[in-house]
Amino acid sequence: MTAPAPPLPGGEELVERVLARYRERTVTALLRHIPEQSPPYLYELAADYPARPCKGLRSALCLATCAAFGGRPQRALNPAVTVELFHNAFLIHDDIQDGSELRRGEPTLSAAYGVEVALNVGNATNLLGLQRLMANRRELGGELAWRLFEETELMCRQSLEGQAMEIAWIRDNACTLAPADYYRMCLKKTSWYTFLYPCRTGLLVAEGADTDASRLDRFGWYLGAAYQIQDDVLNLVGTLADYGKEIAGDLWEGKRTLMLIHLLERCTPAERTRAEHYLHGTRAQRGPGAAEDVRWLLDRMSAYDCVESAREAAAGLVAAADREIAEVLAAAPPPDVPSGEAAEARDFLLALPAFVVARAS
């Protein structure tokens, strides 16, 4: 396995600083565009998830990519808000589909207000994202606005297809999946809307509608898969205070993570039969008595080194992401931006792969 590049000195601090700065810009702009007049339980709740403590990774990637490739981040602020709005709409709907109870350390909208309210708020958040897409025509010109619309349609399609894959695996009790199936799901569900879409959007704003927006795709794909693996690992071995979501929630929901796929490949026939029996049905059908099975699955994953194998896979993906971003930045002309923001944005992109697998939330 190829080892990742050594972390940049001060890389974690740099990433945290850039994330915090860009998140503040994005959330401030986002909240300005939420209507003040609202029917009950609608627009005021669309501000709930964005205002909760979070990293703001996706919008920061959009702004940092724009700066790193010679653009003015202010021109990318509205696209960054669009990225954040679609992200939060996905979160609301994802929490409904998974029956999740916690998001960013607080009750999910569906847990606090019910599925009907949460579903409508998710749809309203998508509407607000569409409004921001429309505003690009005025702020960035028609040609670039259309390219950004095309990128958004592509991201939504890929993400929905990835979500459909995951839902189908649970619904059909798929127990013969290979790691390649998991990686394909990661590409569609995680890589596209967490990394490829923000990077492609920032690159288009920096270089114009005619640019090749795919130059960062391999970087985004590798990083997205590593990010998803780390998220799945934290779901099993993280702490509630850091992770902000239910620990072992993926096992309660029957999600086909890389660790679960490894377990089903490595365990004995008798253990496989027990695992398949547990995975059949929904979380609600399992009931609270399934806690013993969840503990057993965690124990078996430990016995077969499933978490360690997943971490090794993530490290290999980070090494590939390191190579990709270094090569793309080396081939790009130095950005002509008077402040130090462009150089810091480049350092941010270079430091991000190591940060993705070192994070605790």
Image (spheres, rainbow, N blue to C red):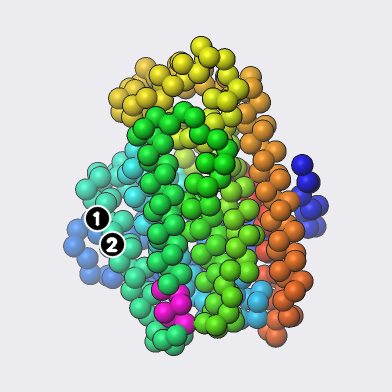
Closer to the camera in the image, 121 or 181: 181
Is residue 312 in view?
A: yes
Query: In the rendered view, would you say 328 is above or below 119?
Result: below
At horizontal 41% and vertical 21% (from top left) the residue drawn is: 278
Give the magenta-colored segment's residue range.
144-149
Name the foreground residue: 238 vs 231. 231
Q: Residue 275, percent across and down?
A: 47, 20
Answer yes or no: is residue 17 visible: no
How far, Cα to Cα, is label 1 from label 2? Answer: 6 Å
Question: What residue did someone put label 1 on?
Answer: 120
- Quadrant that contains the N terminus: top right
Assign a secondary structure to mark 1. helix
Q: Say whether marks 1 and 2 touch (CB < 8 Å).
A: yes
Q: Where does label 2 land, which residue?
A: 124
Left/right of residue 341 with respect to residue 90 in the rendered view: right
Q: In this view, does 258 lie to the left or right of 105?
A: right
